[in-house]
Amino acid sequence: MARRRFRNRWPWWFAGVLLLVAGGGFVAGLLGPGHWDDRPRGSVEDIERLARRDDVNLLFIVIDTLRAERLGSYGYERDTSPALDRVAASGVRFARHLAQSSWTKSSMASLWTGYYPARTGVTRYDDIIPSAARMPAEILKEAGFQTVGLYRNGWVAPTFGFDQGFDVYQHPAGRPLPPAVRMANPTLSNKGTDEGLVENALEFLRTRSTGRWFLYLHLMDLHEYLYDEESALFGSSYSDIYDNSIRWTDGVVESLLWSLARLGLLSSTLVVVTSDHGEAFLERGFEGHAREVYRESTEVPFVIAFPFRLEPGVVVTGRTRNVDVWPTVLDLLGLAPPEGIDGRSLRAELLATARGEHPARSEEIAIADLDRTWGQRGKEPSRTIAVANGRLRYVRSDQPEGPLEQLFDASDDPRELRDRSAEQPGTVARLAETAEAYAESEPVWGEPPTRELDELELKLLRALGYAIP
Ligand SMILES: [Zn+2]
């Protein structure tokens, strides 16, 4: 819908004329039909120079519930994500990227702060990110950016501490669903779509004052499996509809990129795309997320597009994590990330890969962690912790009869369905030690503040499919 609407209303020649009128200095011919990409070609030196530029804006897109391996650029056989694939192919794609939880609030707290869940302490439904946390929006605001966040998931609401550093932080009011969406999703209520959120974002970009900006968009249609008839390409099973919804969301992102090009902003904007967790489709008897931390729920995309095209794009194959996202982005922009955090900047690795050097293969440990009783008032935590190391993933889950330990090896079992723990007791013991040391780490700001959710919030979160008593 998004793509079709744009093509109908804004044929390429009209977009080109607009750009010339706007004095953006672009050549109209660069915007051929189907090509939003008007960025100049760039080099490794241009990536290095970003830190010294004072005109670069930042667009940070979180696509809630996006499982990496369902994107074409991550090897999926279906054409679910042509626009995101194009972004990845002309920028940097991190091929093995782990989210730190499979539940939005805990995962997003780690993404923003650069600390693992045990260190943020934000693991339960009523936990709040403490004000002592140093958030990227605070750093960007101090550096002179206008900071705007638009979200449609209640778990990242200001009342949970996620608005720190934002000049504007809003959950835009839902608009009536477009008829084509309503027809394909008869059970949906009129609580808006990501198209509405993007409209709000464009309103900000059109009316903003001069100066640099940081815009965070938290897209939510995929979480709700929303799609329209044009993106209904892959069938009607639960898993097919998820793919349809990725295609829809990809179209929403593409329409946003077109708009940035039209506003003359694409060549001065760093675009970052990632997700808070994946989604399971009965691989092990579970559907959805926020219940376990196996690969299908925690391996997410991480893609950076520069204000210029890289040809070819860069693929970083070493293990990376959501706690590394902000140290990397801030470092690219010449800003210092907070000290002592669990995440690290991937800038050096990125530059080395872009130069064609092969950085030492990273055997870095990556952890995902979930308290499975996060939504149950008064219940003792029931933790499941995954330790990814190379091609191995160790998963330890609390059970009434004692912890269940599993070991998976993606080198000959890419879906990680065969438990190897009995075959490799030495490896299990080594990774169990890592998990144990991690489990004993304390929240850096002490136990987080909490608050009771009111009935309206509970209703909204239940409407998202979360089973909160
Ligand atoms: Zn989520």
Image: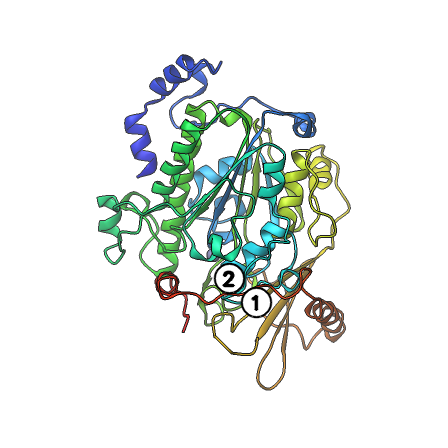
Q: Is residue 321 visible?
A: no
Q: Is mark 2 within 8 Å of ligand 1?
A: yes
**Residue on which disc 2 sits:** 103
Q: Are marks 1 and 2 in contact (CB under 8 Å)?
A: yes
Q: Where, quadrant-wise, is the C terminus in this rendering?
A: bottom left
Q: Quadrant of residue 467?
A: bottom left
Residue 370, disc: 1
Residues at marks 1 and 2, CA–CA distance in whole angstroms: 7 Å
Residue at 70% in and 75% down: 423
Please provide percent x and percent y for residue 286: 45, 70
Q: Amino acid at mark 2?
A: Trp
Q: Earlier in the sequence, mark 1 or mark 2?
A: 2
Q: Where, quadrant-wise, is the N terminus in this rendering?
A: top left
Callout 1: 10 Å neighbours few (<14), some, many (20+)? many
Residue at 72% in and 32% down: 355
Q: Quadrant of residue 363?
A: bottom right
